Amino acid sequence: MIEDILDKLAELCINKKIQFVTAESCTGGLVAKLITDRAGSSQWFERGFVTYSNLAKEEMLDVDAALLNEWGAVSEQVAAAMAEGALKNSQAQYSLAITGIAGPDGGTVEKTVGTVCFGWAWLNPESGVINSITTSEVFAGDREAVRNQSAFFSLQKLHQLMVEYN
């Protein structure tokens, strides 16, 4: 199933001459790995940021420390900032960001294990404005299952956005 969405993304990006960037926390570069496992992905994948720590999010993606302190790393606010920061720190036109609690521990009553926040951003070519959307999901399963579901979900939504806005 992941192969299908990667095929669609590759075809769309090549046909439209667009690239995207990833900003990953709890998935630790899994999305970038899945993409770069494919020959020719350099035509449509610009780069990937693995920002596991809050400091990495601040330094590499320009996520404001105040935002991290107020909302926590696992929040839609931080996911949006990660997606926007990835776009600003690359040459890509689209981005996706993933931050969450893959487990087996680290969860709280408010944010249980399996909670993952996503952000996607895209550059409006006419205005130069960056638009972004976010969502959160709670995935079931062990650490690997949460990470795999997060990767698939993020790529599926990215493809949907590219179709809608390109």
Image (spheres, rainbow, N blue to C red):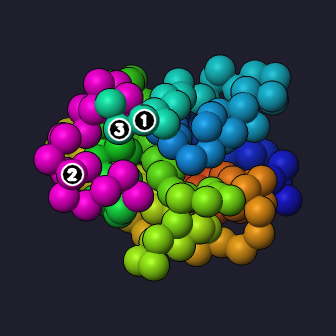
Label placed on residue 53: 1
Q: Position of residue 93 (x, y in %)?
A: 40, 37
Left or right: 155, with 5 as reference point: left
Instruction: Where is residue 32? Give x, y as percent.
Output: 65, 33
Query: Could you tell me which secondary element the residue under label 1 belongs to?
Result: loop
Give the Cα separation between the discs numbered 3 and 2.
Answer: 10 Å
Q: Earlier in the sequence, mark 3 or mark 2?
A: 3
Residue type of the residue flagged with mark 3? Asn
| Mark 2, residue position | 69
Residue 118 located within the stretch drawn in magenta: no
Q: Main secondary structure of the magenta part?
A: helix
Vertical side of 55 occupied by 120: above or below: below
Q: Is residue 144 left or right of residue 156?
A: right
Q: In the image, residue 61 lies at what x, y percent? A: 32, 32
Asked if 75 appears above or below 23 in the picture, the reply is below
In the image shown, does 110 or 16 lie closer to the viewer? 110
Contact (CB < 8 A) between labels 3 and 1?
yes
Amino acid at pointer 2: Asn
Farthest-out residue, bottom: 109
User: Within 10 Å of the Cα at label 1, are there few (<14), some (14-19), or many (20+) other Cα atoms?
Assistant: few
- Magenta stretch in the rendered image: 56-74
Q: Are marks 3 and 2 in contact (CB under 8 Å)?
A: no
Quick one: label 1 or label 2, which is nearer the N terminus?
A: 1
Query: Against 95, is 56 above or below?
Result: above
Residue 71 part of the magenta segment:
yes
**Residue at left 21%, top 51%?**
69
Kindly tell me whether residue 151 is visible in this rendering.
yes
Q: Is residue 144 left or right of residue 160?
A: right
Circle 3 SS class: helix
**CA separation, marks 3 and 1?**
4 Å
Q: In the rendered image, which residue does mark 3 sit on?
A: 54
Q: Where in the figure is residue 68, as x and y percent of width and height?
A: 25, 49
